[in-house]
Image: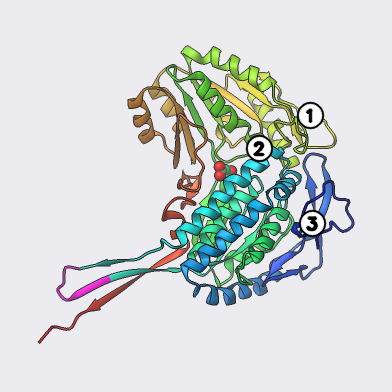
Amino acid sequence: MGSAGKYELPFKLNNPDLLRNLSYVNGEWVKSKSGKTFEVVDPGTGKAWIECPINDASDVDEAVKSSYESFLEYKKTSPRQRAQMLYKWDSLIKENREDIATLLVYETGKPKSEAYGEIDYSTGFTWWFAGEAERIQGSVFTPALPNRRVFTIKQPLGVAVALVPWNFPIAMNLRKAGAALAAGCTMIIKPSPETPITILTLAYLAEKAGFPKGALTVLTTDLDKTPELSEALCRHPLVSKVTFTGSTRVGKLIARICADNLKKVTLELGGNCPVLIFDDANIEQALSQIFALKYRHAGQACITANRIYVQSGIFDKFLDRWNAETQKIVVGHGSDEETTMGPVTTPRSIQKALELVEDAKKKGAKIHIGGNKIEKNGGYFFEPTVITGVTQDMDIAREEIFSPISTFIKFETEDEAVKAANDTSMGLASYLFTKNVDRLWRLFESLEAGMIGLNTGNSSAAESPFGGIKQSGYGKESGKDVAVNEYLITKTGTFTLEEQS
Ligand SMILES: O=CCCC(=O)O
C-alpha cells in the first residue's frame, strides 16, 4: 500500500502510508471477491490516478458479519474509552491535515484552501462526538402508580451503514462515523466512487487511533455496482441502521428498501435552498456570506444558495456587486495557489449545468455571466454563471443546481418572497438577510426548512443539528443529543417495589 500501482501519482505525500486503495474489512486491507477495480479520477485533469476494488453484493455478508462480531465487543467499551479513541482519531487527522487536504483536492477538485476548510470543519465532529460519548444518558421517573419506578437506558443499535456522498467526503463521513462510534455502534462505510481514498485514509487513522478491528469497515465500489452493493447492505439482517446523504430520488429508494425490515434510517437529501435579501439588509454582509455559500466547492453543497431573492429597492445594486465579485473568480486546478474555484467533481454535473442554463434561456432568463463549459487541461470546469429573470417554472428554480450558477429573482413584498421561497418540495436550509428583528423572527418561524441562516450563509457546525424537512429527508446529524440518538435505542425498565410490612 502507499503507492498508486500502475498510475503515476500527480502529488507527493509527507506520509505515503496514508494512501490506501484496498477495502478495509475486519481490520484487513483486502481486494474484492471479483478482484475487479475502478479508477479514481482527478476532476481537474480528467485523468485517473489510482484504482480501488469494485465490491458487489457478494462482498457484503462477510463484511457485515465481521462488523457485527466487532459490535458485540465494541458495545462493551466504556463511554470514556470511546471518547479517548475519538480524541486520538481527531488529533491524528489534524496531524495529517496537509496530506489529507492534498488527497481531497485530487478526488473532489476543490481548491486547497477549501480542502483545509473541510478538514477543520470535519474535525469539529470528531471532537464534538468524543464529548457526546460521555453524555449519553437515560432517565428515571416516579410514575402515577405507587411503589413503581420507571427508568430508561440508552443502548447502541448495532451495525450501521453509511452511504457517503462525494462533495464533502471527510465531513460527511466524520459526521456519521463520529456519532455512530460515540454511541457504541460499528459502522460500514460505502464511499462514493469519486472519493474513496480520503475515506480509506480516515479508516487507516481510525485503526492507528485504537479502534478495534471491525469497528469501521470501508467497502469501495464503482458507479455501476453502487446500487447492488448499497441494496445488499441495506437488506442484510445484521444491519440495524442506515444513514444516507445524497439525492431525494435515491433517498426514497433507500427508505423503501429499509422499510421492508423496518430499519432505522437517517436521510440527508437534496436542497433547493432559497435566500431572501431585504432592502434593509447590510448589502456587504449579505454579499460576502452568500457569495461564499454559493461558490463553495463550485456550488456543489446541498445547503448552497439555489435561488437568490432580492427585494426591488436594492436589486440592481446587489446584482452589480455580485457580478463584479463573480468576475474575480479564478477557475483552475485545486492545487494551484491562485485558484479560487475548482472544477465540478463529475462530468455529469457539467451536462446538468448546461441543460439547466438552456432551459432557463428558453423560458426567458437572462445570462449575465458565464453559462458554458470551460475547456482546460481535460478538467470538468464550468464558468461561474449569473442568471436573472428566473421564474418558478424553470428547472433551475425547481431542481438542485449543484454547479456554480447563481440565479436571481426580484421581489416586492415579504409575503410574496416567503411564498416563493416555500414553493418547493424540498426543505433543507433557507437564508434571510434583514436588520428588522421582528422580520427575522417571523421568517425563522415561517420558512419551511430544517435550518435557517439569519444574516448568515454559514450555519453548519458540529454543535448545530443538521437536517431537513419535507423531501429533504429526516433525522438529524450533529448537534447535542439528537445526532447520537440516531444510533441508540431507548430501553424502558419498570420496577415494582415490595410493600413494606
Ligand atoms: O452538502 C452537504 C453538506 C454541507 C455541509 O455540511 O455544510
Q: First in sequence: mark 3 or mark 2? A: 3
Q: Is residue 206 above or below residue 247?
A: below
Amino acid type at image mark 2: His
- Residue at 70 percent across and 66 percent down: it is 24
Mark seen at residue 374: 1
- Residue at 51 percent across and 68 percent down: it is 81
Q: Nearer the viewer, residue 120 or 59?
A: 120
Amino acid type at image mark 1: Ile
Picture quarter containing residue 307?
top right
Q: Answer few, some or many: residues within 10 Å of disc 1's Cα (few below 14, many 20 plus, some between 14 and 19).
A: some
Q: Is residue 179 left or right of residue 416?
A: right
Q: First in sequence: mark 1 or mark 2? A: 2
Where is residue 431? Give x, y as percent: 47, 31
Q: Is residue 88 above or below residue 100?
A: below
Q: Which residues are magenta?
A: 143-150
Q: Which residue is mark 2?
A: 297
Q: Which residue is mark 3?
A: 16
Where is residue 36? Give x, y as percent: 81, 64
The secondary element bearing badge 1 is classed as strand
Disc 1 from disc 2: Cα separation? 16 Å
